[in-house]
Amino acid sequence: MQLPLGEDRIDVELPDCDVTVAEPTGGEPVDVAAAAERALDRPLGPPIAHRVDAGDEIAIVVTDVTRATPDDVLLDALFGRLDAAGVDRENVTIVVGLGLHRPLTDAELADAYGEYADLAINHDPEGTVEVGTVDSVSIDLHPAVASADFVLATGMVEPHQYAGFSGGAKTVAIGAGGEPIIRHTHGPELLGQDGVRLGRVANNPFREFVDRAGQLVGPDFCVNVTHGPSGILDVVAGSPRPVVRELAEAAREALSVPIDREYDAVVAGIGAPKDANLYQASRAATYVALGDRNPLRDGGRIVIPAELPEGAGQGTGEQRFYEWLSNAATPDSLYDAMAKGYEPGAQRAFVLARVLREHDVYVTNVSDPDASAIVEECLMRSMESVADAIEPGSDVLVVPDAIDTLLVSPERTS
């Protein structure tokens, strides 16, 4: 079988194991440019032409390289509508919604946003301004977004460990927000609530808080996509909440795989851009073990092939993730310490600790020895290949695309 690794794929053989492959139906890919135009023609809510004036200052918040969003194509469609409304290009600022991720390089900006890269600036979470409060939490925002007359956003509606599905208001409220909202939404008190889970939008406290923050900060209008193993599956535009609901439903239908048994090991594929660093690649483990249906037996292991060219990761959040994990003696001590509180960005270590308390995590095919050492420092094991990390005779579930697969109980699909 083949699994993703970076931008390529690797062959994996487990001849001494009983192997089951979990592959969702995946849905049918769309022509993104054509689908974006259709979505903007029939938005969920008032169209852009009815909401902007020629002299308006416009902010567009876009996703960063950790999302596989076709931002350049979506920007083409949005600029077409803004141009038709008489908005000059110089009145538009594109803000890269980094949250606490690292800034994009000039080359990454050019690759991600094409002809609009000269309008793009990296978000700085330390350079925000307060625009209001929600539940006594200060809601800070990038100045260009805070001062805009109209806020647009792109987004990827994909399974998300905390929000249920990403996209919608999250691109602006978190991506272009300051540390107070990130500290609150990613803290142990909110993340420990039952409704905060992968694949759930309704009755999800994380999603509900972000949506309420979105009413304060925007976006006023968004164009979001969802994707599966075959590519982009749909494009929907309009008001953030109904956009997320519609795309999440499409994603569930395309990405769910019912699981009716338990396994000794799960091989969780991830690939680029998520396997650039350990912070992002660790999502494969938490998506498998902390979703609707954990497919592992007690003591079962998770194996993730990932190149990790950036090591633990270079952003503020990634470094805090590394510091917590590398300084911990055991998963139990890490979880107990973090349950008392932690800095924004470190939440991935807290969620990963929940998995590591129950399961060993192996990372294989790492690109260089320094990155392998980082894996070992972070309470996980680094092995040369997937086969090296699997005991002969194991009952193995292979999830070729762990981010784009929802492992669910059989009754969820009945």
Image (spheres, rainbow, N blue to C red):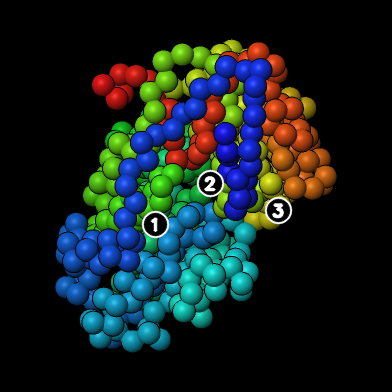
First along the sequence among labels 3 and 2: 2
Q: In screen coordinates, is 90 left or right of 237?
A: right
Q: Classify mark 3: helix, strand or loop.
A: loop
Q: Which residue is mark 2?
A: 183
Q: Could you tell me if residue 221 is visible in this image?
A: no
Mark 1–mark 2 Cα distance, whole angstroms, equals 22 Å
First along the sequence among labels 1 and 2: 1
Q: Classify mark 1: helix, strand or loop.
A: strand
User: Which amino acid does the dot numbered 3 rest on?
Assistant: Glu
First along the sequence among labels 3 and 1: 1
Camera-nearest residue between 85 and 73? 73
Q: Which residue is mark 1?
A: 155
Mark 3–mark 2 Cα distance, whole angstroms, equals 24 Å
Residue displayed at 37% across by 20% down: 409
Q: Which quadrant of the structure image shows residue 74?
A: bottom left
| Position in image of residue 191 (x %, y %) | 48, 34
Mark 3–mark 1 Cα distance, whole angstroms, equals 24 Å
Q: Which residue is mark 3?
A: 310
Quarter holding the C terminus is top left
Dot 2, crowdedness within 10 Å: few (<14), some or many (≥20)? some
| Position in image of residue 217 (x %, y %) | 36, 61
Residue displayed at 51% across by 14% down: 262
Q: Classify mark 2: helix, strand or loop.
A: helix
Q: Nearer the viewer, mark 1 or mark 2?
A: 1
User: Which amino acid does the dot numbered 2 rest on?
Assistant: Arg
| Position in image of residue 20 (x %, y %) | 51, 22
